[in-house]
Image (cartoon, rainbow, N blue to C red):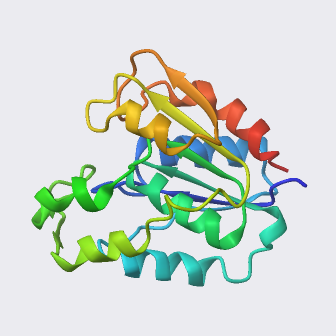
Amino acid sequence: MTTTHLLYLHGFRSSPASAKARQTAAHVAARHPTVTFWRPQLPPSPRAAMGLVARGIADWPRESMAVVGSSLGGFYASWVAQHAGCPSVMLNPAVDPARDLARYIGEQTTWHNPSERFYFLPEYIGELQALDVRDRSPAAPELAIIAKGDEVLDWREMVGRYPHAEQVVLEGGDHALGNYGDYLPLLSQFLRLA
């Protein structure tokens, strides 16, 4: 089955204007113009973020949709894939954001617009815990692209989190996956984009 609908989920403090989100959008538009592509701006609340996504994909065909997520978006992508039963691609995915983001409680700025501020509230930690699907086997094929040089997340945790996934483990690299464009053909092939 080919993928006709593709969801892209950005990471913490990121946005649909991130380099990877824009590269994915451009790649899909140029190479797979019939694919429905959506890269929503996710609210800071994990519960609200997944509520927005659930409403946005409610009418999507489960048998031909897929999800890509980066960092915290990778954590979310695993939740979406579990509930939609669809293939997923994780890019340097957050493994335990409830643990890692606890130190970010309070006012934050976004990467792409430092004048834009939001509050990361204490209750969001519990919301992240409620979305954790680490104890479940994947519902569909997974691809994880992981950089050993990630300066934010531990690559060994990422590798260990996705034992059933097809993994591309990069020597060096960084959290932003500066060479992400090199892997878009692999993403297209793995997801069988229409």
In terms of depth relative to the viewer, which is nearer, 173 or 109?
173
In terms of depth relative to the viewer, which is nearer, 136 or 20?
136
- Residue 130, how many percent across, how many down? 39, 75
Residue 72 picture quarter: bottom left
The quadrant the N terminus occupies is bottom right
Which residue, as the protein is rendered here, is positioned at the far front? Answer: 135
Q: Residue at x 48, y 32 (%)?
A: 146
- Residue 84, how many percent across, how many down? 68, 71
**Above-or-below relation of 161 to 124:** above
- 101 vs 82, left or right, is left
- Residue 169, how many percent across, how many down? 52, 24
Q: Residue at x 39, y 81 (%)?
A: 48
Which residue, as the protein is rendered here, is positioned at the far top? Answer: 171
Count of marks placed on residues: 0
Q: Residue at x 33, y 29 (%)?
A: 150
Q: Residue at x 61, y 44 (%)?
A: 26
**Above-or-below relation of 161 to 121:** above
